Amino acid sequence: MEMLLPIVLTLLAAALSPLLRHISGRWGGWIASVLPAGLFVFFLSQLPTVQAGGERTFSVTWIPSLGISLAFRLDGLSLLFALLIAGVGTLVVIYAGGYLGGHPHRGRFYAFLFLFMSSMLGVVLADNLFLLFVFWELTSVASFLLIGFSHEKEEARRSALQALLITGLGGLAMMAGFILIAIAGGTSEVSELLSRGDLLRSHELYLPALLLLLLGAFTKSAQAPFHFWLPGAMAAPAPVSAYLHSATMVKAGVYLLARLNPALGGTDEWHYLLTLAGGATMVIGALLAGPQTDLKRLLGYSTVSALGMLVMLIGLSTDLAAKAALVFLVVHSLYKAALFMVAGTIDHETGTRDVRQLHGLMRVMPFTAIAAVLAALSMTGFPPLLGFIGKELMYEAKMQAPSASLFLLIAGVLANAVNIAVAILSGMRPFIGRGKHHPAQAHEGTLTLWLGPLILGLSGLLLGLFPDLIGIPLIEPAVRSVRAEHVDVDLALWHGINPVLLLSILTIVVGVVLYLLRHRARDASARLRVPELLLPGGVYRRMIAALPAFSGRLVGVIHNGNLRSYLFTIITVFLILAARTFVDLADWPVLSRLGDVEFYSVGLVVLMIAATLMVVASRTRLAAVAALGVLGFGIAALYVIYSAPDLAITQILVETLTVVIFLFVIRHLPRFGERSPRPTQFRDGVIAVLSGTMVALFSLKASGVQMDSAISSYFAENSVPAAYGRNVVNVILVDFRALDTLGEATVLAVAAIGVYAMIKLRKHHGRRAG
Amino acid sequence: MNALILRISARYLSPILIGVSVLLLLRGHNDPGGGFIGGLLAASAMSLLALAHGTASARRSLRVDPRTLIAVGLLLALTSGFPALFGGREWLTGMWTLPELPLIGAIPLGTPLWFDVGIYISVVGFTLTIVFALSENDEEEAV
């Protein structure tokens, strides 16, 4: 039960968050931070259990017929992520309080943020593939709302939609992959699947399942060629980028790969697909980061690069690579969240994010500067920060890679060097420099704005000096989850002089040189313009632009606005299908049952036929409607005769309302005299007579067929004892088949809203035109 | 002349019709009636009012926007399934209680009635959403 509590509480907080708009911005952040801080402590308290190799589980049945349950499980990997989600979440919420200040929609912002936190916790705690999928998609929805928070800006709306479409489509592919995995493995429980790795890997569905799953993981974690949504998402407010785009959501794909590694990993396909995609993303992200001048876009592209490194490390599938991936995951979350917050603070206090316009801010923003420099040092992998340990491990893992080790190392050094340049440019450059600081109006942010980044920066230093604080309690259980066996984790700053250390030094030197040459690099990349249409982002934009035109044409063909043509299509299709069925049914309806008809029924039918003829023959619309009414009431009378009072009442009421509605629209209809040309009339007449005949034949046939009476007799027998009602029709509507009724009511509601919109919108258009 | 008869009869008929519609709703489980029929009748009564006295007057008598009624009705129908969940049954399973009332004796009260009230309200809501939109459209263009 305690596994469910964090998710439920956060969801509840999301529901209550709108109330925070009544509290001043800064205090709102502090108050809201109580929950994630509490969750952080709660997850910390689970450390001893998990470290001892235990795990916490909770499960209730959900859809037993499909073997899907609401199963949650907390093991080493989940705990690592949960701590990041709650820990960084706490600092981000405090930061958001200062960043948003008195923003009128701050309550809504916290609601979205908590919705995201809840679903992200769900992703890492879910122990069932389909439950995980639900939370996964929820994070996409929450991210859409958060990126589009400044919805009055067109760019924010477009970026939000782009992120949603890409991660959403990837999510759907992943769902298909999950279904295949569940078929191949015979269960959708993750913990069960992990022990059926051999079965899964040898199954014929393995490759399609893997490819679909990777689509989900790669879109979410911004792997090339889907990386472009992440820099676009930089339109989000800074707290969102610090949370979603550094530590949590973009790591969901990495989480999924790490989680399913024991079940799916270790094959050649896994190895090549992941290292290739990850390696390419690592290099592409770094190359694209180089020429950026906007602080957040710099960080965004370098995040793409870092995510590539993580995916590549998981693809290597060695103990060392898993260790390196998880350490780097923590390192990256700490420094990237801090740097995003710093970028937000700079933007907030100076009004610009252009690195070319920022320098010498150290003197006016001392706390922010310390936080930024610590984070940037960790990013460069400078000792004694945690980033140094992360990078050493990464190089070591690459050197011991099963294949293509040299290629990976070169790509790694290149990407890391660019990231070092990015770190200097975004985390140090704005603060250093002699002379007057720039821009002139710059000043230090409030406590809420620098506390978060400072804590994150200091933890990078602290954990670097004392790596055992996380090594054995946190990384070791997490590595055990990924490798499905115990792996010793012994983190240390100093390994003596070895090739890895030399590589680290080389990387830093190259990085600094790249930084110094940045102007030349920027010019070079400006000359080297790849046509936008060839880039994935351009392809996406072209597809999005072409879609409305395509659907417009399609709708023009099948949905032309002419009611008669719809009826024509519907009835003709029905006729053809019904005729086909009739041919299959060999024996023709028996007409002998016609004998026991009362004389008044005959009179009624004659009246109805006369009314029908009048509808067709009438010269005025009012007469036609009146005749149609006679027909409708005639049907109601037939219902009474055949003892179906509920149907009769409904029929009468519907007839009445039809007349009322007709009264309102009669003046707006086109002139009645305009009739179709003769041939069309003839065609319509033939179809009408044919369909009427067909329905009549069907009714006769149906009355002659001996149906399986189990259902109707069940309803009749159980209506009174089980449902306390003598009116079987109503009992079916509200009890036995209540779900159908609810569905129908929902359809009617949607139809009513549609009709309402059509009427009001038409008037709106008319007014604008006039 | 005609309009006068219509106006006066509408004024007296509509409340009676609404009363009957509630009766139909309540007795629906045992005798002909129910939420759908009751809702249609109530909507007819309000439509009559709109026809005789104008939409603005009918809207005032209804007090709430019919679009709100759609939402409220659907929400009621939806939530009527929840008690079953707390009882460990499938969603929307009818749950019953048989309270003893003085004079009348035990009467069965259950979530199906709750559900039916939701259907009643939403039927009134979506019928009147359409009827009022059309009648307002008509009145505006007639002016």
Image: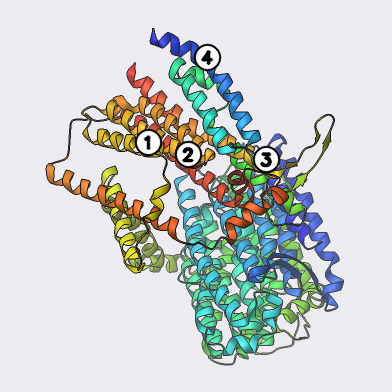
Which residue has dot 1 on it? Answer: A604
- Hey, what amino acid is under mark 4? Arg
> Label 1's element?
helix
Query: Disc 1 and disc 2: Cα gap in Å?
Result: 10 Å
Query: Disc 4 and disc 3: Cα gap in Å?
Result: 29 Å
Nearer to us of marks 3 and 2 is 2
- Hey, what amino acid is under mark 3? Leu
Chain of the residue under label 3: B
> Label 3's element?
helix
Which residue has dot 2 on it? Answer: A641
> Label 2's element?
helix
Mark 2 surroundings within 10 Å by alpha-carbon count, few (fewer than 14), some (14 through 19), many (20 or more): some
Nearer to us of marks 1 and 3 is 1
- Hey, what amino acid is under mark 1? Leu
Residue appearing at x 71%, y 34% in the figure = A22
Which circle's residue, 4 or 3, is located before the other in the chain?
4
Residue appearing at x 50%, y 78% in the figure = A211
Say left or right for A87 vs B133.
right
Query: Disc 1 and disc 3: Cα gap in Å?
Result: 36 Å
Query: Quick one: A463 or A576, which is closer to the camera?
Result: A576
Query: Quick one: B55 or A418, which is closer to the camera?
Result: B55
- Hey, what amino acid is under mark 2? Ile
- Are dots 2 and 4 in contact, CB under 8 Å? no
Say left or right for A565 vs A499.
left
Residue B11 is marked as 4
Q: Do pointers 2 and 4 mark residues of a single chain? A: no
- Are dots 1 and 2 in contact, CB under 8 Å? yes
Residue A358 is marked as none
Q: Quadrant of residue A603?
A: top left
